[in-house]
Image: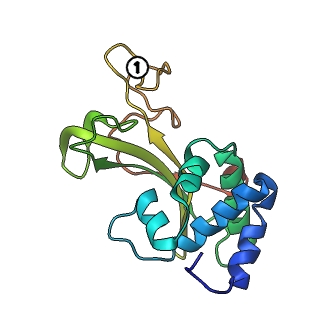
Amino acid sequence: MTIVKNRLRFIEKFLSRFNPQFSKKQMAVFRDFIYAMFIDYKRLSLSAIANNANINYQKLQYFFSESDWNINELNNIRVKILQNQRTTHAHNNGVLAIDDTACPKPYAKHTEGAQVQYCGPSGKQENCNVAVARCFVSNSKHFPVDFKSYLPITKKGVTKKGGRKKGGQSDFLGLPLGLKTMLLPVNLATLSRL
């Protein structure tokens, strides 16, 4: 990999916390991917990352689509890292912000989750992907806690992936699509359970 000639100690220390979640081959791809995120991209995609960071595209594609690792465990480690840092840990004077965001996908015919649904940026229904995020917010800091795709309901009550959903609800805290930002008081015990 030609992104950084020498490994950076602070990044290696950060990455070492994720070692138990990956095999050696997976960890090598994860490490390359993290270093590759320091490059500016005109349009971020696995292909652009592979080309700019000199990473084998097939290994990168396999890592994200087929490789066996648990996204929830990675997120738990990330939140623990934030909680253990003096500058990023949550405190009782913050709120949990819940917000949805949409990305228009006018030409995406086969993209998972992209369907005609309400798209906030355009203010109308159009083909888009929607995600719901939970973030800790206070006067001095904010950081993402969780981020999940919203898979819309089809007329038959089945998502494109084939899973059954409750009519008109997100699988994320049961919140309806098109919600406005929601602020909830949060304490450290609540945040650790998310």
Can residue 194 be seen at all in this image of the molecule? no
| Front in this rendered view, residue 69 or 167 | 69
Give the image location of residue 28, x and y in percent.
70, 63
Above or below: residue 88 compared with residue 76? below
Q: Residue at x 22, y 43 (%)?
A: 107
Give the image location of residue 44, x and y in percent.
39, 63
Q: Neighbour class for label 1 at 10 Å: few (<14), some, many (≥20)?
A: some
| Front in this rendered view, residue 53 or 125 | 53
- Does residue 173 appear left or right of residue 51 in this picture? right
Q: From this viewpoint, which residue is outermost toward the right? A: 20
Q: Quadrant of the N terminus?
A: bottom right
Q: Residue at x 70, y 55 (%)?
A: 26
Q: Amino acid at mark 1?
A: Gly
Q: Secondary structure at mark 1?
A: loop
Occupied quadrant, residue 105? top left
- Does residue 170 appear left or right of residue 156 in this picture? right
Can residue 184 be seen at all in this image of the molecule? yes
- Does residue 41 appear left or right of residue 53 in this picture? left
Look at mark 1 in the image and give the residue it sits on: 167
